[in-house]
């Protein structure tokens, strides 16, 4: 299922304009002054699929802030949509009844701790503890507290050996605060006057319905009953990161309804994996007033667990830019002797520059303590308390005295929500059976939600999702070399081949252009499964479909090898990364490849779109001519996607779908894998984005 090797991953952006260079090269001889050759040269527009330096979660992810606020506001819209698509949350699913259960109160002198069970979606529970201050007048700020990948999550207790080391290094100073650091931050925030919801990640503490470390499992890969990390789940945008993000959204839904909580002053803070949950929720949910993601935001490692990775999430972006989406609201970060250690010089200055577009530089802070390893230790927690005190307007006149004070830790028996009449889920409510049922029902609700929308709204959503899936960043013309054969006369007319090479990688794509007469009222662009070879027979003569068009005499024919087509070794399977961080096999996830790099399908569509755009924008004789795009012999999905995104740049679309459906993909390394597309209606929904009056669809059964 996977092709592996040294964490190799791809970034393949679309080729850009090379027209001027091609024109200068090709028009330098007398041969090109002939009228029919002049026409030929004017319409030879080529594109290239470029393999740049491989990207993994451990690559370098710099953030280059835009120069104007207007530029950023447009980028903000695009990036937020990309994040939501990656999480399977575009559009946000219809909210279902949370059916909150708040029970089993544990009384302390200054606060009360409750067990909480929320039904985030029917059948799936979010569990945690609610810390409520006592003897407080008026509404109080709320704080969401996702825990991250600490052993046993919300129930975490440092073993004696680890706690002794923390005391020795100065990372902790007090018992029990340092022994129970996750409880300590909730208790202290409650003592400062905040209502705190400390909730579980998937598979931690009381979240028992399925394991946190699922990974690819052959038994869960069926078209009818699938599990996470399977082709069917990926095609529907279903991933564990998205489920955790949805849990955070629903936790916020509930927290803001509590009578004690001031919904205008709700913050989130977590570290490591909890830091990822924090800055992701802050990026997509405007209800938060402050965010403090600890030891996670950096230009280096982006998130090691499969629960921190999703297809499309970090293509052409990274954690620093995602965190920037929270601007100009208050945001605090920490750095340690881990992947965040260079944040002071790489990432934070750019983040502060972005905040400067709103004249809000003071709203973003970095607390760097790189003498400590990866942590949410006492110095970091102290920085967080002071940050929350300022930005949630808690009103405490902190001096130099320690903010954290001793407390009576809760036992696991006191913290668990599965007690008394609230029994722990069993049977069909846990494990593989539950996982399959949950994903099937989420898919059904998603399909019903889209079907209920007006046609134009549904098309707007599909087009937005497709834009996020295809993506692509343009690269300058200086990165291109153009080589072209001298056009030659064939029995059917003129044949010309051009080769576009990327200077950095040495890789290239080939395009052929055919003419029978020196006129050009229409340009016909052909794509297929295998590229140019699909349109020539064993004698290197154009097949009937091309020959008939050439016989009309007024058409230019362009046939293109898209990314991975043609050449001596055409791409039959997409190379994938088994693991992004060298850990155990449960880290297998398609997101380690397509969370950082565009899919092979996206690269093909990017190239096709770029080529078509150049025929319209570079003074070609065909700039005003009719442009017909043909997707035949397996090329229908590429042509349909390009036309859907380009709109009326393409005058007519002719495709033979051969009944292709993305939903029939059975392996993760299929070259047509496009995560999320089945959620939005598969190929029929893409075709629906094209003007039906100028679209011919064949091959449907």
Image (cartoon, helix red, strand yellow):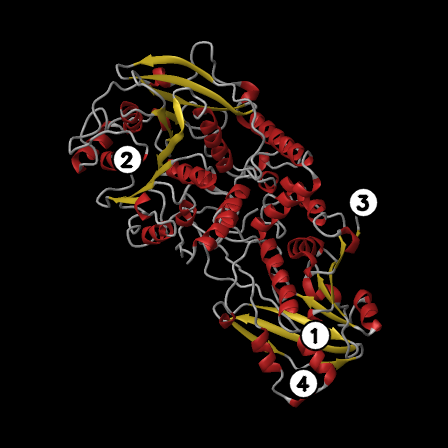
Image: 448 above or below 529: above
Would you say the residues marked 3 and 1 are in contact, meaning their CB atoms lie under 8 Å apart? no
Residue depicted at x 32% and y 48% = 361
Report how many numbered discs are placed on residues in the image. Answer: 4
Between residue 670 and residue 46, name the one nearer to us: 46
Query: Circle 1 — which element?
Result: helix
Q: Residue furthest top?
A: 421
Q: Are marks 2 and 3 in contact (CB under 8 Å)?
A: no
Viewer-side label of 2, 3: 2
| Relative side of 469 to 171, left or right | right
Query: Which of the pair 497/85 is nearer the observer?
Result: 85
Residue 701: assigned label: 3
Looking at the image, residue 682 sits to the left or right of residue 383; the answer is right
Near mark 1 (Cα within 10 A), the count class, few <14, some 14-19 or many ≥20, is: many
Mark 2 lies on residue: 390
Q: Give the spatial CA distance, label 2 vs label 4.
A: 71 Å
Instruction: Work out how far the residue at label 2 is from the one at label 3, CA to CA, in angstroms.
Output: 64 Å
Foreground label between 2 and 4: 2
Q: Is residue 405 visible?
A: yes
Image-quadrant location for residue 24 = bottom right
Q: Is residue 661 left or right of residue 18?
A: right
Whichever of callouts 3 and 1 sits on the residue coming sooner in the sequence is 1
Q: Identify the residue under disc 1.
A: 621
Q: Is residue 208 visible?
A: no
Q: Earlier along the polypeptide chain: callout 4 or callout 3?
A: 4
Mark found first going from the N terminus, 1 or 4 = 4
Secondary structure category for the residue under label 2: helix
Residue at the spot of label 4:
32
Crowdedness near tag 4: few (<14), some (14–19) or many (≥20) residues, C-alpha within 10 Å: some
C-alpha distance separating marks 1 and 4: 15 Å
Residue 14 % position (x, y): 56, 62
């Amino acid at each position: 299922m996977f092709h592996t090797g040294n964490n190799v991953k791809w970034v393949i952006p679309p080729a850009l304009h090379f027209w001027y260079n091609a024109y200068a090269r090709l028009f330098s001889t007398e041969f090109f002054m002939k009228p029919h050759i002049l026409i030929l040269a004017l319409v030879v527009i080529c594109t290239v699929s470029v393999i740049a330096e491989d990207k993994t979660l451990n690559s370098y992810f710099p953030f280059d802030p835009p120069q104007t606020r207007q530029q950023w506001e447009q980028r903000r819209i695009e990036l937020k949509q990309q994040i939501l698509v990656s999480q399977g949350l575009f559009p946000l699913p219809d909210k279902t009844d949370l059916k909150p259960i708040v029970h089993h109160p544990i009384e302390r002198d200054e606060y009360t701790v409750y067990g909480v069970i929320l039904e985030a979606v029917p059948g799936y529970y979010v569990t945690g503890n609610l810390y409520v201050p006592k003897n407080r007048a008026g509404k109080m700020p709320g704080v969401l507290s996702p825990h991250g990948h600490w052993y046993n999550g919300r129930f975490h207790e440092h073993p004696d050996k680890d706690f002794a080391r923390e005391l020795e290094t100065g990372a902790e100073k007090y018992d029990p605060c340092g022994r129970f650091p996750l409880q300590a931050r909730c208790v202290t925030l409650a003592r400062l006057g905040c209502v705190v919801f400390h909730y579980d990640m998937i598979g931690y503490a009381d979240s028992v319905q399925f394991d946190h470390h699922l990974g690819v499992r052959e038994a869960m890969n069926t078209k009818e009953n699938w599990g996470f990390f399977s082709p069917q789940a990926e095609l529907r945008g279903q991933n564990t990161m998205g489920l955790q993000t949805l849990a955070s959204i629903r936790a916020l839904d509930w927290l803001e309804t509590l009578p004690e909580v001031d919904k205008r002053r709700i913050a989130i803070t977590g570290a490591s994996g909890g830091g990822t949950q924090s800055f992701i929720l802050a990026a997509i949910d405007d209800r938060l007033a402050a965010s403090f993601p600890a030891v996670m935001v950096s230009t280096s490692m982006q998130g090691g667990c499969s629960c921190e990775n999703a297809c499309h999430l970090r293509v052409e972006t990274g954690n620093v830019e995602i965190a920037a989406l929270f601007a100009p609201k208050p945001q605090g970060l920490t750095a340690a002797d881990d992947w965040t250690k260079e944040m002071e010089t790489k990432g934070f200055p750019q983040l502060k520059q972005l905040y400067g577009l709103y004249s809000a530089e003071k709203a973003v802070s970095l607390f760097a303590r790189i003498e400590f390893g990866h942590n949410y230790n006492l110095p970091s927690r102290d920085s967080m308390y002071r940050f929350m005190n300022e930005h949630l307007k808690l009103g405490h006149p902190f001096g130099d005295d320690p903010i954290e004070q001793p407390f009576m830790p809760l036992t696991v028996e006191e913290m668990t929500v599965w007690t008394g009449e609230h029994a722990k889920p069993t049977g069909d409510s846990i494990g593989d059976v539950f996982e399959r049922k949950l994903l099937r029902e989420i898919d059904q609700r998603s399909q019903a939600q889209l079907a209920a929308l007006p046609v134009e709204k549904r098309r707007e959503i599909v087009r937005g999702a497709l834009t996020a899936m295809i993506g692509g960043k343009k690269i300058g013309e200086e990165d291109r070399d153009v080589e072209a054969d001298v056009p030659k006369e064939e029995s059917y007319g003129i044949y010309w081949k051009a080769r576009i090479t990327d200077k950095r990688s040495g890789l290239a794509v080939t395009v052929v252009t055919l003419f029978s007469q020196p006129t050009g009222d229409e340009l016909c662009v052909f794509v297929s499964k295998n590229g140019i070879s699909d349109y020539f027979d064993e004698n290197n003569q154009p097949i009937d479909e091309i020959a008939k068009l050439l016989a009309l005499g007024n058409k230019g024919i362009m046939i293109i090898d898209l990314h991975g087509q043609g050449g001596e070794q055409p791409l039959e399977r997409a190379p994938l990364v088994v693991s992004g961080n060298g850990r155990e096999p449960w880290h297998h996830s398609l997101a380690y490849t397509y969370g950082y790099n565009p899919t092979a399908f996206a690269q093909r569509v990017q190239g096709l779109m770029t080529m078509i755009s150049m025929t319209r924008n570079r003074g070609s004789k065909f700039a005003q001519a009719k442009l017909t795009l043909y997707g035949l012999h397996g090329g229908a999905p590429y042509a349909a996607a390009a036309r859907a995104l380009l709109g009326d740049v393409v005058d007519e679309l002719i495709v033979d779908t051969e009944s292709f459906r993305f939903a029939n993909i059975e392996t993760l390394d299929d070259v047509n894998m496009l995560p999320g597309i089945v959620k939005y209606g598969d190929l029929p929904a893409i075709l629906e984005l094209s003007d039906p009056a100028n679209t011919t669809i064949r091959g449907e059964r």
